[in-house]
Amino acid sequence: MATLVRSVARSLRRKNLSSMYSPASTLQSHATSFGFKDIAEEDKSKMVGNVFTSVASNYDLMNDLMSGGLHRLWKDRLVSKLNPFPGMKHLDVAGGTGDVAFRILENIKNVKRRAIQDALDDDLIEDTRIYVCDINPNMLGVGKKRAEERGFGRDKSLVWVEGDAEALSFEDNSMDGYTIAFGIRNVTHIEKVLAEAYRVLKKGGRFLCLELSHVDIPVYKDLYDVYSFSVIPAVGELVTGDRESYQYLVESVRRFPPQEQFAKMIGEAGFQKVEYENLVGGVVAIHSGLKF
C-alpha cells in the first residue's frame, strides 16, 4: 500500500511540483507566483482577491471538510498562545470571517478565566478592541453576518476594517497583539506584511501566524500530497462548483517558505524569541515572535 501511495505521489509531483523545491522557490518566486504559475507582481492581489470572492460564502464549510474540523482546534491553539486579556487592542489580519476574532473575544469575556470580577474588569472589557482586517469585502461580509448570528453584532469590541496587510492604516505601536491565520501565504510581499506587523505592535506585543505548512515525514508526506492534489480540488468543485480556486489554495501552500525559512524571515523583520510549533506533523504550523 505504501509503495502504491509513493508511486502516485511521485507521479503527481512530476506533473505538478517540478519547481516546488528548486532554489527559485524562495521569497522572490512566491512574490510573483499564483500557485505554481508565474505572474506579474501587480496582478497577484487581484487574482487572489478573485479566489476569496469566489469561496467566501462556503469558506467555513470547506475549512471543515478539508481539515475534518481540525481547523477549529488549530485556531483554539493559536488563541491560547496569544493569552488574550481584558482591555487589549488586538489586530487580526486576513480574518474576515471572524473565526479567530470571535475566539479572542469569547476568551476575554469568559468570567471563569478571570479570578476577580469587579467594575474595573467591566471597564477593561468595554475598552477591549479587536480589529478584524481583511482586504476582501466579501469575506468581511461573511464575518459581520456571523457576528450577528453569535450575538456580537452590536459589540463595540469588534471593529471591522477593510485593509491591506502590506499597508495597514493603524498607528505605530498601537496593538498588544497581532494574528494572521491562513492568510500570509496569499500576500504578494511577505516581508512587507511582517514589517507592518512589527510596526503596529507595541513593545512586548506578540506576533502569531497560523499557516498551512510543509510535512516532512516520508510516508505521511506522500499521503498528504495525494490528498491535497487529488481530493481537495475535487471536493471544492463538488461543494462550490469552483475547482480552480481550491487548486490554487493547495499550490500556494507548496510555494510558501518552509518553517525554518519563514522563522528566519520573522526574525529579520525585527521580532525576537521567534519559534514555531508544528501541528499534525507540519500540515500546519504556528509561528510566533515578540517585539522588544
Image: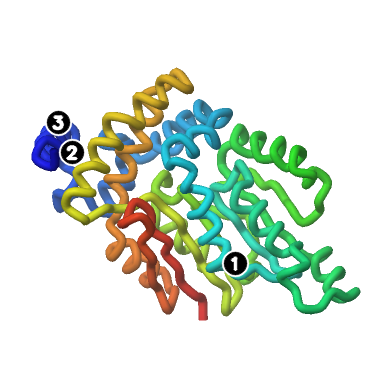
Residue 205 against residue 153 in the figure, above or below: below
For disc 3, the neighbor class at 10 Å (few under 14, some 14 to 19, many from 20) is few
Rendering coords of residue 56 (x, y %): 55, 31
* Nearer to the camera, 97 or 52: 97
> In the picture, residue 103 is in which quadrant?
bottom right
- Whole-angstrom CA distance, mark 1 to mark 2, is 36 Å
* Labelled pair 2, 3 in contact (Cβ < 8 Å): yes
Task: Mark yes or no: residue 22 visible.
Answer: yes
- In primary-sequence order, the first of circles 1 and 2 is 2
Q: Is residue 198 above or below residue 158?
A: below
Residue furthest to the front in view is 1
Q: Are marks 1 and 3 in contact (CB under 8 Å)?
A: no
**Residue of label 3:** 15
Q: Is residue 114 left or right of residue 43?
A: right
Which disc number belongs to residue 126? none
Q: For mark 1, what is the residue? A: 177
Q: Is residue 128 placed above or below 49 in the rendered structure?
A: below
Q: Which amino acid, mark 1?
A: Gly
The residue wearing badge 2 is 17
Where residue 105 sits: x, y (%)? 70, 58
How crowded pointer 2 is (Cα within 10 Å; few <14, some 14-19, many 20+) is rated as: some
Q: Residue at x 46, y 35 (%)?
A: 65
Residue displayed at 29% across by 55% down: 257
Q: CA distance from mark 1 to mark 3?
A: 41 Å
Is 146 positioned to the left or the right of 24 in the image?
Answer: right
Query: Can the viewer see residue 38 in this picture?
Result: no
